[in-house]
């Protein structure tokens, strides 16, 4: 039986933009994700936890985005307390006014165990940082949204 590709679900259904994940709660059966599209606002969805490994590149990309504008952020602060890791990004435009993003520590540890190179070597797949579309390793721009691919 073919495995379902849940990468599309990370895109806003109205504008196809991949917003910032502000909550990611992992349980054995399901993973609850709350995400914010800077244009259309908050939404939440559930994916089977068995699919989480294949979605690590998209999740990593969505966690390190500005909650307000969707741009990639630098990490300003990380706190881990029990089952939760709180991540606060620093956006060039919004500085320290960003809220903490709450991520299950188990998933956060998985995110850190993967590097961009490991993801490419293990999966032979990459994803657009802007829309989450699967891209080829040698692509310079995304076929779906036209964003430049950063290595």
Image (cartoon, helix red, strand yellow):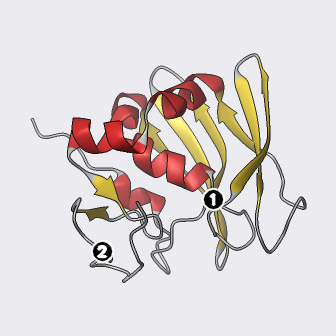
Left or right of residue 142, residue 136 in this image = left
Position of 26 compared to 4: left or right? right
Give residue 33's position: percent from left, percent from top: 57, 45
Q: Is residue 85 above or below residue 124?
A: above
Q: Earlier in the sequence, mark 1 or mark 2?
A: 1
Point out the image quarter for the C terminus.
bottom left
Q: Identify the residue at horizontal 64%, vertical 59% (top origin).
A: 65
- Residues packed near mark 1 inside 10 Å, few (<14), some (14 to 19) or many (20 plus): many
Residue at x 80%, y 75% (from the top left corner): 93
Residue found at the far top of this picture:
82
Query: Residue at left 45%, top 75%?
Result: 16
Q: Are marks 1 and 2 in contact (CB under 8 Å)?
A: no
Residue at label 2? Answer: 140
Q: Nearer the viewer, mark 1 or mark 2?
A: 2
Q: Position of residue 46 (x, y in %)?
A: 49, 44
The picture quadrant where one finds residue 77 is top right
Q: Position of residue 94 (x, y in %)?
A: 84, 70
Kindly state the secondary structure of the residue where label 1 is placed.
strand
Query: Horizontal and vertical percent for residue 51?
Result: 34, 35
The Cα–Cα distance between marks 1 and 2, rounded to whole angstroms, is 23 Å
Q: Quadrant of the N terminus?
A: top left
Tag 2: Cα neighbours inside 10 Å, few (<14), some, or many (≥20)? Answer: some
Left or right side of 140 for 104: right
Residue that extends furthest to the left in the rendered view of this protein: 1
Instruction: Kindly identify which residue carries mark 1.
Output: 20
Q: Does residue 7 appear to the left or right of 41 in the view shown? A: left
């Amino acid at each position: 039986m073919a495995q379902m590709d849940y990468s599309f679900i990370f895109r806003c259904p109205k504008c196809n933009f991949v917003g910032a994940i502000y909550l990611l709660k992992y349980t054995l059966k399901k993973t609850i994700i709350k995400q914010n599209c800077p244009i259309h606002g908050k939404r939440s969805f559930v994916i089977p936890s068995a699919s989480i490994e294949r979605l690590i590149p998209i999740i990593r990309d969505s966690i390190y985005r500005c909650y307000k504008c969707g741009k990639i952020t630098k990490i300003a602060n990380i706190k881990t307390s029990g089952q939760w890791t709180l991540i606060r990004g620093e956006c060039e435009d919004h500085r320290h006014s960003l809220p903490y993003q709450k991520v299950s520590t188990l998933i956060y540890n998985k995110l850190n165990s993967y590097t961009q190179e490991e993801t490419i070597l293990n999966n032979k797949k990459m994803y657009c940082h802007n829309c989450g579309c699967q891209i080829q390793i040698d692509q310079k721009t995304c076929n779906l949204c036209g964003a430049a691919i950063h290595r």
